[in-house]
Image: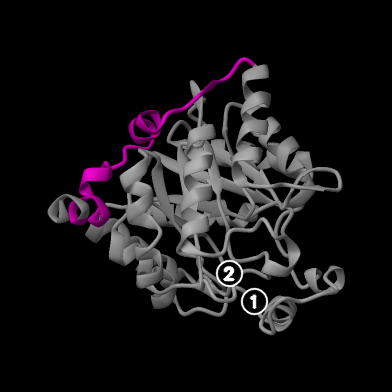
């Protein structure tokens, strides 16, 4: 692992797992997502991981025109690295999942490294008052339908976004086997170092939120990638902060945000993403860690720079 001189805080602002009925603080509209992103950047997040939602009911959205209302305002107002999802939702086709990233050619995009059971149907057992008709069937469907990320789809993503557009990737690894999948594409020259390996823990169907698993994932990644990778970790739900702490202690980076956890403490819902960013920043500085700036991220991950994204070029032409 490339040990972090400065810890990168990523913030996953809204995601596609949680539904509006779970929290009034989950950002839904483009304006809310922009406001939450800018507040998180102000609080110390150097990377903003973005999904989009349909503003009328909060359904996950893939349409570039929805992202058009989110990404340019963020790019115009702050210097944070925009990281666009290619995961979207399991109900989307690969072309739909890549549509926004293909439109904006971002510096960074997420890439899930394998098909898996990605189950969050348990939400249906906890919500009693549903705001929208789509929500309950949506979460229940994850019990019966896996999230597909075939090798063909991974290669398609690497070629369409990486080779053609110069986008680099946050490789989301939900299990140890996903590290070996990344190694396979690295051996073929399709995935290029330095890699950003994002360990994801606590998703039903993936690796559990056990600290021994985090240590093991780093050990295997060290074996496969040596000094050619940066490591980051997050855990879903109540394990969020402790896994961030563990990752930073090992020399890695961290991710927080309402995509992963709707709470700020036991029984207390977070009022926004910036609240979580401030809390993890306090932990990191308490450990004696410095916090990475967007410029630090671009240098460490060898990103192409905001000027080389479609968003930046379009904004310059319009002005």
Q: Please, is residue 128 above or below residue 204 in the view?
A: below
Compare marks 2 and 1 and give the one earlier in the sequence. Answer: 2
Q: What residue do we see at 44% from left, 72% from top?
A: 62
Q: Is residue 79 left or right of residue 273?
A: left
Residue 139 appears in view: yes
Q: Which residue is mark 2?
A: 115
Residue 293 painted magenta: yes
Q: Which residues are magenta?
A: 288-314
For mark 2, does the 10 Å Cα neighbourhood hold few (<14), some (14 to 19), or many (20 or more) residues?
some
Q: What residue do we see at 62% from left, 42% from top?
A: 233
State yes or no: discs 2 and 1 in contact (Cβ < 8 Å). Answer: yes
Q: Position of residue 132 (x, y in %)?
A: 68, 80
Q: Position of residue 77 (x, y in %)?
A: 35, 43
Q: What residue do we see at 67% from left, 36% from top?
A: 244
Residue 298 painted magenta: yes
Q: Which residue is mark 1?
A: 146
- Secondary structure under tag 1 reads loop
Residue 50 appears in view: no
Which residue occupies the foreground of this view, 74 or 80?
74
Q: Is residue 42 left or right of residue 219?
A: left
For mark 1, does the 10 Å Cα neighbourhood hold few (<14), some (14 to 19), or many (20 or more) residues?
some
């Amino acid at each position: 692992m490339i040990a972090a001189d400065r810890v990168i805080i990523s913030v996953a602002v809204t995601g596609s797992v949680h539904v509006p009925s779970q929290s009034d603080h989950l950002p839904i509209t483009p304006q809310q997502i922009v406001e939450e992103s800018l507040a998180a950047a102000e609080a110390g997040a150097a990377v903003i991981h973005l999904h989009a939602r349909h503003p009328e009911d909060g359904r996950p959205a893939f349409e570039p025109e929805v992202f058009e209302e989110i990404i340019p305002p963020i790019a115009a107002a702050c210097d944070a690295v925009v990281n666009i999802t290619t995961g979207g939702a399991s109900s989307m086709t690969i072309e739909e999942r890549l549509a926004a990233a293909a439109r904006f050619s971002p510096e960074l995009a997420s890439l899930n490294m394998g098909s898996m059971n990605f189950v969050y149907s348990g939400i249906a057992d906890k919500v009693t008052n549903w705001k929208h008709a789509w929500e309950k069937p949506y979460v229940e469907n994850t019990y019966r339908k896996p999230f597909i990320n075939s090798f063909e789809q991974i290669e398609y993503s690497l070629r369409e976004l990486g080779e053609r557009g110069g986008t680099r990737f946050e490789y989301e690894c939900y299990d140890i086997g996903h590290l070996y999948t990344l190694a396979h594409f690295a051996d073929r020259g399709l995935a290029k170092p330095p890699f950003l390996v994002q360990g994801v823990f606590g998703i039903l169907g993936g690796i559990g939120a056990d600290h021994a698993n985090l240590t093991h994932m780093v050990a295997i990644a060290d074996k496969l990638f040596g000094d050619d990778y940066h490591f980051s970790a997050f855990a879903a739900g109540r394990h969020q902060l402790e896994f961030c702490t563990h990752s930073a202690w090992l020399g890695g980076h961290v991710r927080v945000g309402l995509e992963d956890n709707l709470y700020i403490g036991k029984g207390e819902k977070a009022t926004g993403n910036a609240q979580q960013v401030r809390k993890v920043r306090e932990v990191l500085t308490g450990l004696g860690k410095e916090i990475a700036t967007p410029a630090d991220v671009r240098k460490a991950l060898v990103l192409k720079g905001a000027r080389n994204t479609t968003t930046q070029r379009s904004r310059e032409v319009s002005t």
